Image (cartoon, rainbow, N blue to C red):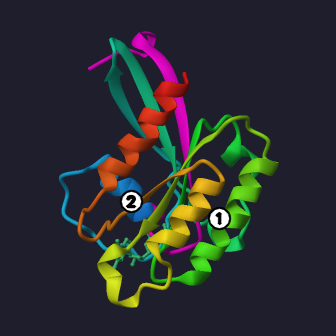
Amino acid sequence: EYSESQITYKLKIIMLGDSSVGKTSMSQMIENPDQEYISVDSTVGFEYISKVYECDGDLVQVHLWDTAGQDKYGSLSDQYFKRAAGAFIIFDISSKKSFESCKGWHSQLKEAGENSVEVVLIGNKVDLEDEREVTFKEAQEFAKEHSFSYIETSVMMNKNIMEAFQLLINRLIASL
Ligand code: GDP
């Protein structure tokens, strides 16, 4: 256990992406990595999950924010973006439309005006390989264009979820 005064850094991470790409499922998996996959059918208003990491003797507190359903309306309040240090932009590899939306989510992030937000692009639901509509290559090219990292995940298979989280944390810590 730790006390507030021991925290050196507080990092806010936000999740961006169309409704039903898997944002809530993913943040729940990050919060409780050992839990069985639980299917969720709607995003019900929780604000963020909190995790504390030790990094070179410093305690880093991470707040991971979920959109709490606002994603359905295609835009998010300024409050959501405020002081974000990092962002996951998530799409579903079996939905071209959700990939196309990533450009818009990135624009909103830029318009919100937070400086130098580290971004990891996530192609989720790789268990749906047979229904894939977005190639690894095109997603990677989009990521490269904007200096994002790209990783493919499956919450259902518990594949690469903690790796994706770690990737963003590492980028953030390197930028501190
Ligand atoms: P959100 O609206 O972006 O928060 O998405 P949810 O987390 O609510 O997930 C939407 C639906 O996709 C739910 O039925 C999840 O169970 C399902 N889902 C989430 N991740 C995966 C995955 O990796 N593979 C598959 N096949 N389904 C997933």
Q: Is residue 38 above or below residue 78?
A: below
Q: Secondary structure at mark 2?
A: helix
Give the secondary structure at mark 1: helix
Seen at 60% across and 48% down, the residue is 147
Q: Position of residue 120 (x, y in %)?
A: 51, 50
The number of discs equals 2
Name the image quarter holding residue 152.
bottom left
Whether the residue under disc 2 has CB within 8 Å of ligand 1: yes
- Queried whether the magenta region covers residue 9, the answer comes back as yes
Q: Residue 122 at x, y = what percent?
A: 47, 61
Identify the magenta region: 1-23
Question: Residue placed at 56% from the left, 60% from the top?
Answer: 68
**Can you identify the residue that label 2 sits on?**
26
**Image location (x, y in percent) of residue 29:** 31, 56
Indicate which disc residue 70 carries: 1
Question: Relative to 103, does residue 4 appear above or below in the rendering?
Answer: above
Three-letter code, disc 1: Gln
x%, y% of residue 21?
A: 49, 72
